[in-house]
């Protein structure tokens, strides 16, 4: 339950306290609380792309089905989907990375970094 709360609040996967993001799309390189480096290796967040893709599909398919059932013109359907994608993209970016980091921490735990 504590990990889910930390995930929803966009916190560090190790200490569950430090903020992972410093701006809308900018991540801290290290946790401001425990000092752990967020990306373990080059290409670490590549799998987060697949999570974002899956979450995006889960969000866009119900909208598409609803618009098709309402017999919306194709131009309206495309416009709605483009706007919806633009609006949810920052959240997908953030939460796909967080889901990846928290899942990785659960499967391959690591301790906080010692202070320098």
Image (tube, grey):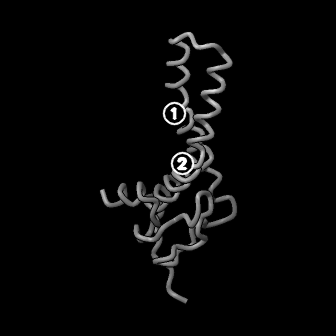
Say if 33 sits above or below 7 in the image: below
Q: Quadrant of residue 23?
A: bottom right
Residue at point 30% right, 56% down? 1
Q: Position of residue 97 (x, y in %)?
A: 55, 54
The answer to which of marks 1 and 2 sits earlier in the sequence is: 1
Q: Decide if residue 5 is on the left or right side of residue 35.
A: left
Q: Which element carries disc 1, helix, strand or loop?
A: helix
Image quadrant in which the C terminus is located: bottom right
Q: Which residue is mark 1?
A: 59
Q: Which element carries disc 2, helix, strand or loop?
A: helix
Residue at point 65% right, 32% down? 82
Crowd class of label 1 (few under 14; some 14 to 19; many from 20; radius 10 Å) = some
Q: Position of residue 37 (x, y in %)?
A: 57, 72
Q: Position of residue 66 (x, y in %)?
A: 50, 19
Say if 6 sits above or below 47 in the image: below
Residue at point 41% right, 59% down? 9
Q: Nearer the viewer, residue 39 or 30?
A: 30
Residue at point 56% right, 42% down? 88
Q: How many marks?
A: 2
Q: Which residue is mark 2?
A: 91
- Mark-to-mark CA distance, 1 and 2: 12 Å
Crowd class of label 2 (few under 14; some 14 to 19; many from 20; radius 10 Å) = some
Residue farthest toward the top in the current orientation of the protein:
71
């Amino acid at each position: 339950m504590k990990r889910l709360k930390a995930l929803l609040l966009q916190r560090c996967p190790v200490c569950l306290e430090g903020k992972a993001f410093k701006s809308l799309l900018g991540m801290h390189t290290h946790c401001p609380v425990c000092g752990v480096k967020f990306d373990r290796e080059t290409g670490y967040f590549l799998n987060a792309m697949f999570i974002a893709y899956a979450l995006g599909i889960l969000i866009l398919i119900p909208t598409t089905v609803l618009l098709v059932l309402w017999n919306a013109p194709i131009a309206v359907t495309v416009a709605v989907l483009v706007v919806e994608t633009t609006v949810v993209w920052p959240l997908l970016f953030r939460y796909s990375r967080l889901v990846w980091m928290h899942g990785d921490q659960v499967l391959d735990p690591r301790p906080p970094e010692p202070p320098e």
